[in-house]
Image (tube, rainbow, N blue to C red):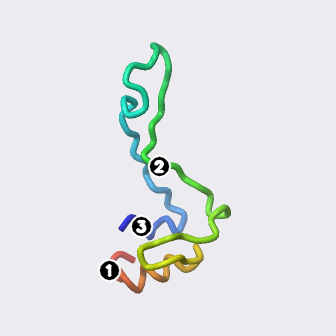
Amino acid sequence: MKYNPQTSFGVLEKIEMRETSEIWENPPTGLEILNPAFETVSRRYIDGLITEAGIFASSHVHNYFAKLYPDMI
């Protein structure tokens, strides 16, 4: 499961930066390559989330996980 309940309250998830060699093994000198593990998307652009348990409106995901994993909330 990849869900951080704190993000429902505005806490930003730390984005892991991966090795540039995953993108380009021998880039030209002076070229900066960023390789984030994932990107963030503003909540206003998300209508729903696809999970193992089904598709949820984004406003219902926190409640679903609170019931399933109460010790995490």
What residue type is disc 1 on?
Asp
Structural distance between the alpha carbons of marks 1 and 3: 13 Å
Counting from the top left corner in percent of width and height, residue 13 is at 45, 56
Q: Residue at x 42, y 82 (%)?
A: 66
Mark 1 or 3: the one toward you: 3
Q: Residue at x 41, y 86 (%)?
A: 67
Quarter of the view holding residue 25: top left
For disc 3, the marked residue is 3
Decide: is 46 above or below 65.
above
Q: Residue at x 50, y 61 (%)?
A: 11
Decide: is 48 above or below 41.
below
What residue type is disc 3 on?
Tyr
Position of residue 61 in the picture relative to residue 24 (left or right)? right
Find numbered disc 1 in the image and state the secondary structure of the residue it sits on.
Answer: helix
Disc sitting over residue 71 in the figure: 1
Position of residue 54 in the picture relative to residue 41 (left or right)? left
Decide: is 59 above or below 15.
below
Of mark 2 and mark 3, the one earlier in the sequence is: 3
Counting from the top left corner in percent of width and height, residue 44 is at 67, 63
Structural distance between the alpha carbons of marks 2 and 1: 26 Å
Mark 2 or 1: the one toward you: 2
Disc sitting over residue 38 in the figure: 2
Of mark 2 and mark 1, the one earlier in the sequence is: 2
Counting from the top left corner in percent of width and height, residue 20 is at 40, 30
What residue type is disc 2 on?
Phe
Of mark 1 and mark 3, the one earlier in the sequence is: 3
